[in-house]
Image (cartoon, rainbow, N blue to C red):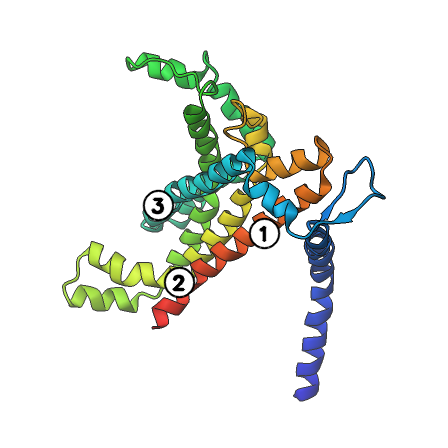
Amino acid sequence: MRTVTTRRQIRLAVMLVPATLFILVLLVVPILVAIPESFRAWNLLRPEDRTFVGLANFGALLVDTTFLRSLRFTLLFVFVTLAVEIPMGLGAALAFSSIRNSMVRGLGATVLFVPYMIAPLTTALIWKLLLTFNGFINALLSGIGLSPVAWFASPEWAFVAVAIAEIWRSYPFGFLLFLAAITALPEEPYEAAVVDGATRLQAFRLITLPLLRPTLTIVLIYQMVLKLRVFDLVYLMTAGGPVDYTTPLGLLVYRYYFRYREAGIGSAGAVIVLLISILITIVIIRKTFVEQQT
């Protein structure tokens, strides 16, 4: 028996090798390269001229109004989109879980998941066409007696435009995970709640939400990390404008590298994004599991 178990473990380890190498090459190696480079001052046009400057790159970013504006936009973008996506995904999952016909439920879930399968490039082009001044959305607003909006002319409306596109694109991810988790919940706690006279709202608050806590944590962390490094969707819709009010950190890091050729500052910006991701992940995990146990 022990020999069979050992062979199975070896087989599983071998199967994990490709995924492990993929993670090392595409994630770990760039991080290990970016961290030491963030402490150096060097220009891509003079790659041989590198000078150790310590925390000077980070200090330069923290007093740079463009970086601070980009940081504020990115954090607000993450907060707003997640604050809308999570209730939308959970509400849609609860609605679909009440459908008894599995074929209808599966077909409807597939249709709702379509936006997530569309490339961000296509999503950006779709919503840019919809939100042009003479586009469908403004025609719809005019049809109900409202004034058309110049979506990309002001920072506020440009933010709303990219947030709408991101919510439409990414909320199906949470919906699918919530739906899978809800359909797998045990029925016994709900039967006991009915016997005790609990309402649907009480059952949802006291049973469903606590049982969905691990799924909620996965959705929050995964989506938060993706939104912190959002690039293509915002770039194709607004190019970071007007001026630079909708420039996410991912786009700003790209500009430091390939427009300004300042690889040291670009690496420092990438490290700051990494640190923010780690910090928020720790907070989410602590709020979800540590405080629950205490």
Q: Is residue 185 left or right of residue 30?
A: left
Residue 288's disc number: 2
Instruction: Compare residues 18 and 260 and report the one nearer the observer.
Output: 260
Mark 1 or 3, which is nearer the eye?
A: 1
Label annotation for residue 274? 1
Badge 2 marks a residue whose secondary structure is: helix
Q: Which residue type carries mark 3?
A: Pro
Image quarter hosting the C terminus: bottom left
Q: Amino acid at mark 1?
A: Leu
Q: Residue furthest left?
A: 197
Mark pair 2, 1: CA separation: 21 Å
Residue 208: horizontal and vertical position, in percent? 31, 59
Q: Label 3 belongs to which residue?
A: 87
Is 238 drawn above or below residue 274 in the view shown?
above
Whether label 2 touches label 1, CB < 8 Å:
no
Hey, what amino acid is under mark 2?
A: Thr
Horizontal arrangement in the rendering, residue 6 relative to residue 62 (left or right) = right
**Residue drawn at (73%, 64%) of the image:** 17
Q: Quadrant of residue 247?
A: top right
**Which residue: 17% across, 61% down?**
198
Image point (21%, 65%), residue name: 193
The label nearer to you, 2 versus 3, is 2
Which tag, 2 or 1, sits closer to the chain's start?
1
Can the viewer see residue 216? yes
In the rendered image, the residue lying farthest to the bottom is: 1
Residue in front for this viewpoint, 28 or 84: 28
Q: CA distance from mark 1 to mark 3?
A: 27 Å
Mark 1: secondary structure: helix
In the foreground, 70 or 112: 70
The answer to whether the residue labelled 1 contacts the one labelled 3, judged by CB atoms less than 8 Å apart, is no
